[in-house]
Amino acid sequence: MNWAYVILAFVTVQRLAELAIDRRNTARLLAAGAYEAGAVHYPIMVAMHAAWLATLWATAGGRPVSLPLLATYAVLQVFRVWVLMTLGRRWTTRIIVMPKAPLVKTGPFRFVRHPNYAVVIAEIAVLPLMFGLVWVAVIFTLLNATMLSVRIRTENRVLYGTRDHLSA
């Protein structure tokens, strides 16, 4: 059995399931009066993540799997689930703001302002490194850092600032 393909299939199914959760939660939140910030950069972020996964599918097959990094990735999934469970019906892949709703300050948010981004930063590096693909980890870590610099700035403005509608 080629474990690289099994791992990539798991990650792909996980990401597709998250997009389904995102669609459902986003629709419900918007119907309840929320608004989206950062819609302009969202397609770029999705394209970057899709390119990361496609690059892994194209390059990781048949490569050996580092068991310590596989274990690290498994621990990251525990943190990912913790974030999703903490946010519950408020979790989306977008920046959806419900005016006057209190910020979530429980679960991992007690310790880190943006725990989901911390998980994603680690995943983007750990998964390619698990297959010995240092160049993929470096390129997509740099791309992700650029994307998150825009995204976190936008999210901080709407969640911790004036909560005005932003298009950036």
Image (cartoon, grey):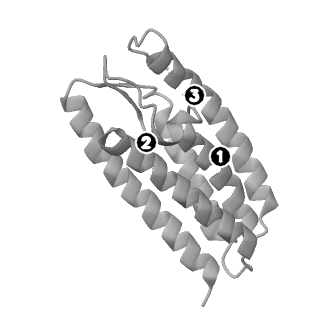
**What residue do we see at 53% from left, 59% from top?**
78
What percent of the width, then of the height, locates residue 138? 78, 50
What number is the disc on residue 93? Answer: 2
Distance of mark 3 from mark 2, alpha carbons?
13 Å
Kind of residue at disc 1: Ile
Distance of mark 1 from mark 3, alpha carbons?
13 Å
Q: Nearer the viewer, residue 18 or 73?
A: 73
**What residue do we see at 43% from left, 42% from top?**
93
Mark 1 packing: few (<14 Cα in 10 Å), some, or many (20+)?
some
Task: Specify the quadrant that holds the N terminus.
Answer: bottom right
What number is the disc on residue 152? Answer: 3
Q: Is residue 91 depicted above or below 41 in this figure?
A: below
**Image marks 1 and 3: residues in contact by CB distance under 8 Å:** no
Upstream in the sequence, badge 1 or badge 3? Answer: 1
- Disc 1 element: helix
Q: Is residue 5 left or right of residue 59?
A: left
